[in-house]
Image (spheres, rainbow, N blue to C red):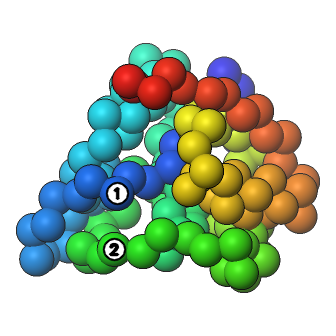
Amino acid sequence: MAAGEAICCICSRSKNHDPHPLPAVERYTGTHIKHVKTLAENQKNPFFVLSGVHGFIPGRSMIWNYDHLLQPNEVAALAHKIGQQLKYYGIKTLHFYTKDKPNWQPYLAALKQGAEVAGVQLHVNYLEDDT
């Protein structure tokens, strides 16, 4: 992949509940996180996580433990934040990995809107449910 490309996946409900800040890749413990992080490493691309609280963040970003499921009425505000973050990180092409789950739809909607505002080419890839 070329410069300006990145790989991203959604955060996860399952978390490491350590009370101290942890890198996002350690805070979120869903199996899809490890799978997509490995894809990014194999392709030598930066890995990001899409969080309903933090937006579009590098996998190495330190975050506190929290529990929040993005709601449809929060999509517009998160999309604005994501658009700014995509520009900040210089992302031109984003490969997003997700699953076709109802609770994940607001995240995808926010990312699509944010990518459009930032002029980012978004490629959505669907993972198997057991990933």
The residue singled out by tag 2 in the image is: 67
Q: Is residue 95 above or below residue 117?
A: above
Query: Is 97 left or right of 28, judged from the image as shown?
Result: right
Are the residues tagged 2 and 1 within 8 Å (C-beta)?
A: yes
The residue singled out by tag 1 in the image is: 13
Where on the picture, by quarter, is residue 92? Answer: top right
Q: Is residue 97 above or below residue 103?
A: above
Residue nearer the viewer, 104 or 85: 104
Residue displayed at 79% across by 40% down = 122
How far apart marks 2 and 1 lie (CA) works out to 7 Å
Query: Is 21 left or right of 96, judged from the image as shown?
Result: left
Residue displayed at 56% across by 56% down = 103
Residue displayed at 31% across by 34% down = 31
Residue nearer the viewer, 50 or 2: 50
Residue nearer the viewer, 57 or 72: 72
Label 1 packing within 10 angstroms: few (<14), some (14-19), many (20+): few
Q: Which quadrant does the N terminus fall into?
A: top right
- Amino acid at circle 1: Arg
Residue nearer the viewer, 100 or 27: 100
Residue 118 seen from this side = no
- Amino acid at circle 2: Asp
Residue displayed at 31% across by 43% down = 30
